Every structure is written in C-alpha cells, then in structure tokens.
Image (cartoon, rainbow, N blue to C red):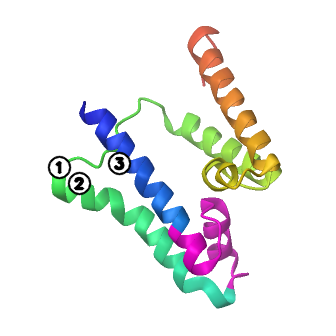
Amino acid sequence: MQTYVSALSGGALIGLAAVLLMATLGRIAGISGIAGGLVSGSARGDRAWRAAFVLGLVLAPLCLLALRGSDGIGTTDAGWLRLAVAGLLVGVGTRIGGGCTSGHGVCGTARLSSRSLIATVIFIAFGIATVFVMRHSGWKI
C-alpha cells in the first residue's frame, strides 16, 4: 500500500509543479529544457527560477533521506558503463525528440499536443523494447 501512496503523491506533486510553473511563468516543466537553459547560459533573464527548479530536484531526495532515512530512489546493480551508456542514449534521444519525458509526457500530453503524444508513445515503446532485450536476449553491457 505504501508504494501506491508514494507513487500517487509523487505524481500529484509533479502535476502540481507543472501547473504552477505554467500558471506563474508560462513555462513548460521540461527538465532537459530547464537544465539546458541553465547550463548553456542562453536563459539570461530567467536563470533564478531555473536554478531553483534544479536545486529542488537535487534537494528533494535529500530531504526525504533526512525525514525517512531513505532517499526513495532505490538501488541498482548496473555498473558505471551501463549507466554512462544509458545516460548518453537518453541525452541523444532528448535532443532528437525535442524534449524529455517530463516536457512531452507530463506537460505536452496534458495540453493534448500531437507531437508530445507521439513522442510519449515512442518513449514507452522503446522502454518496453529495451527491458525486453536486456532481460531476455542474454545481451549484457
């Protein structure tokens, strides 16, 4: 039961954050765009809210760790090579897709953007295919 409550609570908070960002600043809560604008320096006039958003992403699991003794993230047996390759593929996919799962999957689908709906279906399909290949093909990184 605890898993359902935490998942529902987390999803509601993500939705609330997306709605508040759109309502207050007129911006889409796409993490890659927020972080990319912060790192590239192209977002000169709105660095403060971007920095606060990214800082919140970093501090939230640390607060959870302090309150519950667990960061809620879990563990993985994946090695550094697998994590590096996965991160690289996610980054490349984000650039090719013109956004990330948060921008397309959360915000874009809520706005009924056809581009985002298609991107989200593709994200999910490739996620399913990746899990299938990694679990059933014997191919390991």
**Mark 1: secondary structure:** loop
Going by the numbered disc 3, the residue's amino acid type is Ser
Q: Which residue is mark 3?
A: 9
Quadrant of residue 73 in the image?
top left
Q: Which residue is mark 1?
A: 69
Position of the C terminus, as image quadrant, is: top right
Are the residues tagged 1 and 2 within 8 Å (C-beta)? yes
Residue 65 percent location from the top left of the image: 23, 54
User: Measuring 17% from the left and 50% from the top, which residue is drawn there?
Assistant: 68
Residue 86 percent location from the top left of the image: 62, 39
User: Measuring 73% from the left and 50% from the top, which residue is drawn there?
Assistant: 112
Mark 1, other Cα within 10 Å: few <14 / some 14–19 / many ≥20: few
Quadrant of residue 67 in the image?
bottom left
Residue 93 percent location from the top left of the image: 75, 45
- Residue range in magenta is 20-43
Q: Earlier in the sequence, mark 2 or mark 3?
A: 3
Are the residues tagged 2 and 3 within 8 Å (C-beta)? no
Q: Nearer the viewer, mark 3 or mark 1?
A: 3
Q: Which residue is mark 2?
A: 65
- Say left or right for 115 vs 79: right
Alpha-carbon distance for marks 1 and 2? 5 Å
Going by the numbered disc 2, the residue's amino acid type is Leu
In this rendering, the answer to whether 51 lies above or below 9 is: below
Q: Earlier in the sequence, mark 3 or mark 1?
A: 3
